[in-house]
Image (cartoon, coloured by chain):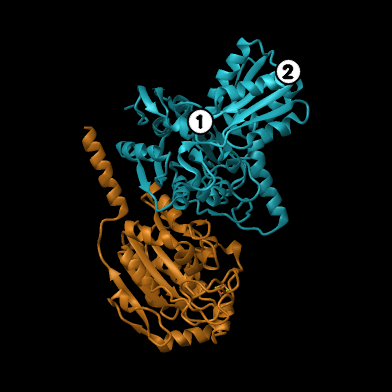
Chain colours: A orange, B cyan
């Protein structure tokens, strides 16, 4: 064991709720390593941890809020974003993070996703995309690749999935990135960058679900997905989000795609307050 | 404008507007809503008024988001509110349950219109009374208040905030289109700070803080985000630490407390108004706009020497069960006019427990009762 590993373990421990271990995630699942990146990103960002609030929805990834030692909220399915928005507007000193899965944020929560991005609400969204619903036993969703198998697409998925970075960028997000679990360092830096950037930041993380999606799609071990990422990923920072669609034969384009400035929702709210009070006086 | 942001004075307002003013007076500084007839004026008024006191109005993408946003704001320490009508109220139900489970103070106003479904958007009804009680899944208790005038919607909106902060539960203001859209004199007084309630806060240290450890009154003190408590809350069944526990025992302990914290305090919560019940043989039990119509019928019946009284429910949930049981010993019958096909009448009948007869005067909505129908019912049971 190298000394740097020891330090990392220590850091991770301090931000985990040790009294809730062991966690529920399967061996080889991508969620745990993504949480590790998140925790290291918090450490490296130097932010006041008492002022970071973590909100999750429902699902395997939705359980993240229960394991991280921050003010943390495990809300209802799909509704982490409006809850997080209310929390952040209620106290602008809070650094609000939503950590949830693809089904939660993009299917049932899809309407909130586009509107929260459109408003450029101050928050960082980490969306773990494992191409299926894990908690309920491996059903297809709006991110499941075409023709992939799941427990509700036994003949192969007939629906075209969302290009998630394109969707959130078009909706108005000011920071959009995608990494796979193989890109742990980049993911950590990206989260740290998003945490300190005002406005709506969105990071898609491709992570394996070996137990369900993997097993049904010839990637039954976590390593199989990582090999798939390794063989197919290309880093293309600044790529146009419309060109980063995940297709069965194309590359997995990863990188930071959007990093722009636009007034945040909080700033716009202050504008309303200024206008109203100027009118009164 | 007063200290707390209210426009003190005497005004001629429609019912939705003093609802917003009541919220301002109570210290509400966050409103999330979605336009819907006949509740839109509440949101409009809040959007105009909140920025003057540095508060925030957000027009959400739907009522599901509205409900969640006010819960989030409450956990940041804000007093928060949303307003809606039937279709939006239905959309709020799941996360109203989250509010109950997370014991989150907030206020939800329902200016009722006739349903089911889109129904009569611009016309009145009282068809959501049972939905208010049972609309979210699972076993729980809720507090719901029913104003019958624009003045009372002002008063009860403040009361709703106070109750929600005191008992850590979402409180419903179940008004209706007739009250929401009638214009009357409304007096907005300066509300003294001592008449406003704020949630119980933890005063022990951050180490070892248990977010759902209740005091003797069954209500846990509430930390808010950003203060260093590092608490966890979840819609899953949880223990005092706020951690999920998937057992029948944990479920029993939690749900029992969530329900009992309202039930044991019911006598402090429940309010009603009685007119001429002392010698009554017949009681008209009514609420909201129907109570005003009932009052005319009761007066008329008294003039015709019928011994009839009015029990006007101000708190509809928890239900004035003890009082109905008492009155059932005294009277021959209860007459229950409501703008639905029988909701609160079921509660009256349950509490009367066969000791007194119960007669519903139904109205499917779209207008208020003709007082004559209530008078006829009074005379029928008085015979
Ligand atoms: S089911 Fe899939 S997503 Fe859920 S914990 Fe197991 S591997 Fe992870």
Whether the residue carrying mark 2 lies under 8 Å from ligand 1 is answered with: no
Q: Position of residue B382 (x, y in %)?
A: 71, 18
The quarter of the picture where residue A23 lies is: bottom right
User: Circle 1 marks a residue in which chain?
Assistant: B
Question: Which residue is disc 1 drawn over?
Answer: B159
Q: Is residue A34 rendered to the left or right of residue B273?
A: left
The quadrant of the picture showing ligand 1 is: bottom right
Residue at 78% x, 29% y is B354
Position of residue B99 in the picture relative to residue A197 (left or right): right
Task: Check whether the beta carbons of the residues at disc 2 and disc 1 lie within 8 A of each other.
Answer: no
Rendering coords of residue A129 (x, y %)? 46, 73
Q: Earlier in the sequence, mark 2 or mark 1?
A: 1
Instruction: Tell me the residue at 56%/84% (across/down).
Output: A221
Residue named by callout 2? B383
Q: Residue A132: x percent and y percent?
A: 52, 74
Q: In x, y percent, where is residue A4? A: 44, 77
Q: Residues within 10 Å of mark 2 (few under 14, many from 20)?
A: few
């Amino acid at each position: 064991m190298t000394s740097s590993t020891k330090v990392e373990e220590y850091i991770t421990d301090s931000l985990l709720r040790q009294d809730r271990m062991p966690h529920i995630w399967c061996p080889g699942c991508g969620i745990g390593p993504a949480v590790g990146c998140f925790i290291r990103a918090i450490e490296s960002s130097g932010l006041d941890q008492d002022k970071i609030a973590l909100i999750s929805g429902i699902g395997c990834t939705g359980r993240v809020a229960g394991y991280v030692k921050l003010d943390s909220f495990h809300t209802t399915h799909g509704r982490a974003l409006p809850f997080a928005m209310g929390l952040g507007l209620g106290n602008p000193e809070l650094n609000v993070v939503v950590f949830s899965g693809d089904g939660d944020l993009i299917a049932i929560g899809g309407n909130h996703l586009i509107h929260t991005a459109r408003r450029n609400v101050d928050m960082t969204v980490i969306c773990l995309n494992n191409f299926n619903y894990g908690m309920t036993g491996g059903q297809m969703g709006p991110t499941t690749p075409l023709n992939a198998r799941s427990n509700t697409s036994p003949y192969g998925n007939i629906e075209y999935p969302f290009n998630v970075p394109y969707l959130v960028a078009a909706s108005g997000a000011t920071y959009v990135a995608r990494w796979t679990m193989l890109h742990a360092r980049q993911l950590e830096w990206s989260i740290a960058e998003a945490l300190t950037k005002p406005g709506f930041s969105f990071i898609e993380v491709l992570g394996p679900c070996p137990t369900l999606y993997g097993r049904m799609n010839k990637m039954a071990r976590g390593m199989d997905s990582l090999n798939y990422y390794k063989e197919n990923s290309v880093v293309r920072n600044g790529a146009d989000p419309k060109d980063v669609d995940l297709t069965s034969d194309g590359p997995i384009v990863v990188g930071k795609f959007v990093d722009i400035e636009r007034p945040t929702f909080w700033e716009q709210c202050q504008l309303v307050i200024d206008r109203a009070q100027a009118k009164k006086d | 404008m007063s200290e707390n942001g209210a426009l003190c004075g005497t005004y001629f307002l429609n019912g939705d507007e003093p609802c917003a003013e009541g919220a301002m007076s109570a210290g509400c500084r966050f409103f999330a809503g979605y336009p819907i007839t006949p509740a839109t004026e509440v949101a409009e008024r809040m959007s105009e008024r909140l920025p003057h006191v540095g508060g925030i109005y957000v027009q959400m993408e739907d009522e599901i988001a509205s409900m969640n946003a006010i819960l989030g704001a409450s956990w940041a320490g804000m007093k928060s509110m949303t307003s809606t009508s039937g279709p939006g109220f239905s959309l709020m139900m799941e996360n109203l349950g989250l509010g109950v489970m997370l014991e989150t103070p907030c206020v939800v106003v329902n200016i009722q219109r006739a349903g089911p479904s889109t129904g009569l958007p611009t016309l009145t009804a009282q068809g959501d009374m049972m939905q208010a009680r049972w609309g979210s899944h699972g076993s729980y208790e809720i507090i719901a208040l029913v104003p019958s005038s624009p003045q009372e919607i002002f008063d009860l909106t403040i009361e709703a905030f106070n109750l929600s902060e005191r008992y850590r539960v979402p409180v419903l203001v179940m008004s209706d289109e007739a009250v929401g859209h009638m214009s009357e004199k409304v007096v907005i007084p300066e509300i003294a700070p001592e008449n406003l309630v704020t949630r119980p806060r933890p005063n022990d240290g951050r180490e070892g803080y248990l977010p759902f450890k209740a005091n003797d009154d069954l209500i846990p003190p509430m930390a808010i985000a950003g203060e260093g408590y590092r608490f966890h809350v979840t819609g899953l069944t949880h223990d005092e630490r706020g951690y999920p526990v998937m057992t029948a025992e944990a479920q029993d302990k939690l749900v029992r407390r969530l329900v009992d914290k309202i039930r044991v305090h019911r006598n402090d919560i429940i309010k009603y108004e009685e007119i001429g019940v002392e010698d009554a043989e017949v009681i008209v039990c009514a609420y909201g706009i129907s109570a005003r119509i009932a009052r005319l019928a009761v007066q008329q019946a008294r003039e015709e020497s019928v011994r009839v009284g009015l029990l006007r429910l101000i708190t509809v949930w928890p239900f004035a069960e003890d009082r109905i049981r008492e009155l059932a010993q005294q009277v021959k019958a209860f007459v229950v006019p409501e703008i639905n096909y029988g909701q609160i009448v079921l509660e009256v009948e349950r509490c009367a427990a066969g000791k007194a007869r119960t007669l519903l005067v139904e109205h499917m909505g779209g207008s208020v009762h003709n007082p004559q129908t209530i008078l006829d019912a009074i005379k029928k049971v008085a015979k």
